[in-house]
Image (cartoon, rainbow, N blue to C red):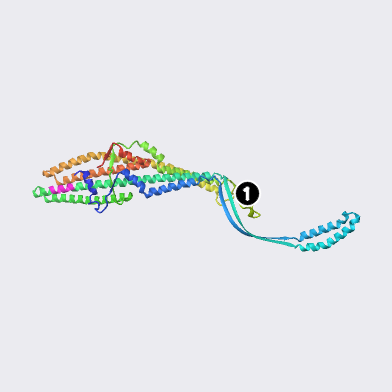
């Protein structure tokens, strides 16, 4: 039975329960699009990027004035006490001196009359002053509404505002780099799971073919035993091999079920997923290694994250420096209800202020040294990340090439193993070969087919890792569309 036909058995009721809904047939590109829609990890990272972008936007107006409007209702009471004793004495003395000198300011014929008048005034003056209390007490109580507008605008912050904004921009870059990293890991996981199910189906098909082949071989052996051409021990030898093949079938059935469940959960498909894109290998090399290395060191998510971390540390240095500089600001306030203003309150006020912290409770020199040490650590981390990326990219490239070449070489092995099995089966039926020779030949053919499928799986997984390392995840579809693609079925 052809292998392609046997692979269809992986979806037969013997493998999938008949009560389960029919699985959804989907290509790899369709699975990738679906994963982008249903993946909580990708969705969560998108929210993180959105949050960092909103945070950056929120900090763009730090140079603008802060204008606030306030209104307050105040109930107050004010008590005043004024001592008038001194003022009364001073007035009495001054009035007496004035009246004593008044007669001399008139002609002699009027002096007597003036003297009489001033004498009477002097006599009445103490009585008049006695009416005035020695102290004056005043108390008032009122409720006023105080609406006002206040504005404060930074003029010079010592570089704090640009440092904060630079840090926010670095936060956006860091979030986007993490998003790209999660996307790459998601794509690699999809390749592993999607083609892992195809691998499980392929291995199950090979196991079924081997089991059926051993069934045929066992039937031939029993026929030869009945004719007296081989002893019972040879039949038992074939029976043991056939039972081992049956166990392999049952084991691969469970592997297919596990792989199917894993892919269905990854793509959030309760009815299951049936991949339609087969395992494949491109006959030609993936491309020059230097191109992958150049792309990886420049655009790899880890490299971008390391650069963002370095920028963030640099912003921390600028912020630490700003704490060692003065700050200048302008301010203003306007009272909208001046009629009810308290006596001590101005109608409006504007001004410019300068503030400098002379003795902080944090050592600014040590804080700056710590920020610079973090910046140097981030720079070293960025260099180390690029070295690691180069190593991983070279490793992934070599794995791709190893798997590709192994796959191509196994074509010859399968052809030779197939012919050897045909010869050994013919020899056994003619009584010239042994059962062990047939068993070994079929085992060799099954092993070669298994290795070929495994090589194809290693190829697609290593290829996805290589493309992720070079930030070229989207180009996986290009390798699927290349004319030199060889399906592993």
**Residue 381 in view here:** no
Residue 190 lies in the magenta-colored region: no
Task: Categorize mark 1 by other alpha carbons within 10 Å: few (<14), some (14-19), many (20+).
Answer: few
Which residue matches tag 1?
Answer: 349
| In this rendering, position of residue 63 left or right of residue 294 | right
The vertical placement of 480 against 83, above or below, is above
The vertical placement of 414 against 240, above or below, is above
Residue lying furthest right: 109
Residue 6, percent from left and from top: 21, 46
Secondary structure mainly formed by the magenta segment? helix
Look at the image and tell me in which quarter the C terminus lies.
top left
Residue 229, percent from left and from top: 9, 47
| In this rendering, position of residue 366 left or right of residue 345 | left
Look at the image and tell me in which quarter the N terminus lies.
top left
| In this rendering, position of residue 25 left or right of residue 60 | left
- Magenta-drawn segment: 212-220
């Amino acid at each position: 039975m052809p292998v392609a036909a046997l692979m269809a058995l992986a979806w037969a009721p013997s493998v999938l329960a008949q009560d389960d809904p029919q699985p959804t047939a989907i290509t790899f590109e369709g699975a990738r699009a679906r994963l982008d829609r249903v993946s909580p990890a990708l969705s969560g990272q998108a929210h993180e990027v959105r949050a960092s972008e909103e945070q950056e936007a929120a900090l763009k107006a730090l140079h603008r004035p802060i204008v606030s409007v306030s209104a307050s209702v105040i109930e107050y009471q004010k008590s005043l006490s004024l001592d008038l004793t001194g003022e009364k004495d001073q007035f009495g003395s001054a009035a007496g001196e004035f009246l004593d000198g008044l007669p001399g300011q008139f002609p002699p014929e009027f002096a007597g009359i003036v003297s009489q008048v001033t004498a009477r005034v002097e006599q009445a003056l103490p009585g008049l002053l006695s009416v005035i209390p020695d102290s004056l007490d005043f108390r008032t109580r009122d409720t006023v509404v105080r609406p006002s507008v206040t504005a404060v605008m930074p003029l010079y912050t010592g570089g704090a505002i640009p440092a904060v904004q630079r840090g926010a921009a670095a936060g956006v870059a860091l979030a986007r780099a993490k998003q790209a990293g999660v996307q790459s890991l998601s794509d690699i996981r999809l390749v592993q799971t999607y083609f892992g199910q195809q691998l499980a189906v392929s291995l199950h098909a090979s196991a079924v073919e081997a089991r059926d082949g051993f069934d045929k071989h066992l039937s031939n052996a029993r026929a030869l035993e009945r004719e007296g051409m081989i002893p019972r021990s040879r039949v038992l030898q074939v029976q043991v091999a056939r039972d081992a093949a049956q166990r392999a079938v049952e084991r691969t059935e469970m592997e297919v079920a596990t792989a199917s469940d894993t892919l269905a959960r990854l793509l959030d498909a309760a009815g299951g997923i049936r991949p339609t894109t087969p395992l494949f290998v491109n006959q030609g090399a993936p491309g020059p290694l230097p191109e992958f290395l150049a792309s990886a060191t420049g655009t790899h998510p880890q490299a971008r994250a390391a650069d963002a971390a370095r920028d963030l540390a640099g912003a921390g240095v600028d912020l630490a420096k700003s704490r060692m500089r003065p700050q200048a600001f302008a301010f203003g306030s306007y009272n909208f209800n001046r009629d009810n203003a308290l006596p001590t309150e101005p109608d409006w006020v504007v001004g410019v202020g300068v503030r400098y912290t002379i003795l902080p409770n944090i050592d600014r020199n040590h804080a700056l040294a710590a920020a610079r040490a973090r910046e140097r650590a981030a720079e070293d981390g960025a260099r180390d990340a690029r070295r690691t990326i180069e190593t991983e990219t070279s490793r992934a490239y070599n794995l791709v090439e190893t798997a590709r070449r192994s796959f191509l070489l196994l074509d010859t092995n399968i052809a030779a193993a197939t012919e050897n099995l045909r010869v050994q089966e013919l020899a056994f039926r003619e009584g010239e070969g042994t059962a062990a020779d047939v068993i070994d030949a079929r085992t060799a053919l099954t092993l070669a087919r298994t290795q070929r499928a495994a090589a194809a799986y290693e190829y697609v997984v290593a290829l996805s890792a290589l493309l992720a390392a070079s930030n070229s995840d989207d180009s996986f579809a290009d390798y699927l569309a290349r004319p030199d693609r060889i399906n592993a079925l």
